[in-house]
Image: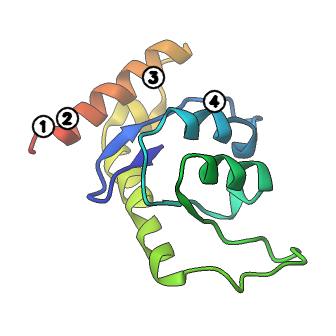
Amino acid sequence: MAVDAHGLPIDFEITGGEIHDCKVAPEFIEKLPAAGHTIADKGYDSEEVRDTVRQKSSIPVIPRKNNSKIGNIDMDWCLYQYRHLVENLFARIKHFRAIATRFDKLKRNYASVVAMACLFLWLPM
């Protein structure tokens, strides 16, 4: 799920539970519009993801995992605080019962329900 600076959804990708985020992140980042910074959590800590973000002329704000040899010396923790916008969006979307319980078994049906929920979040604008 990608959000803008106001916490509104920009794009999303539905994947299986067994697929790691780093596997689909480069293709997902390619689809997104240009941004000054791209903020993600430790689940996206890979050089492939960081390189994809840099190719989009964006600065990656992704903390490294605890077992990393490089460490988080170059990490901007003030910008990283804005990652809560994504978590808040997940909380707002889960108010829709069909999303929280995932009644739809097909990926395309579930994606359409998520898209409709994102549309409802954009309506008050």
| Callout 4 amino acid | Thr
Q: Is residue 118 left or right of residue 84?
A: left
Q: Would you name the residue on which mark 2 appears?
A: 120
Give the residue type that dot 1 points to.
Leu
Mark 4 / mark 1, whichever is N-terminal? 4
Of 24 and 34, nearer the camera is 34
**Residue located at (61% from left, 63% from top):** 41
Closer to the N terminus: mark 3 or mark 1?
3
Image-quadrant location for residue 24: top right
- Disc sitting over residue 78 in the figure: none
The residue under label 4 is: 15
Q: Which mark is residue 111?
A: 3
Q: Amino acid at mark 3?
A: Ala
* Res 123 label: 1
Q: Position of residue 55 (x, y in %)?
A: 62, 47
Task: Give the mark, 3 or 2, whose residue is nearer the N terminus.
Answer: 3
Q: Alpha carbon of mark 4 to alpha carbon of mark 1: how far?
A: 26 Å
Q: Secondary structure at mark 2?
A: helix
Label 3 crowding class (10 Å Cα cut-off): few <14, some 14-19, many 20+?
some
Q: CA distance from mark 3 to mark 4?
A: 10 Å
* Residues marked 1 and 2 touching at CB (< 8 Å): yes
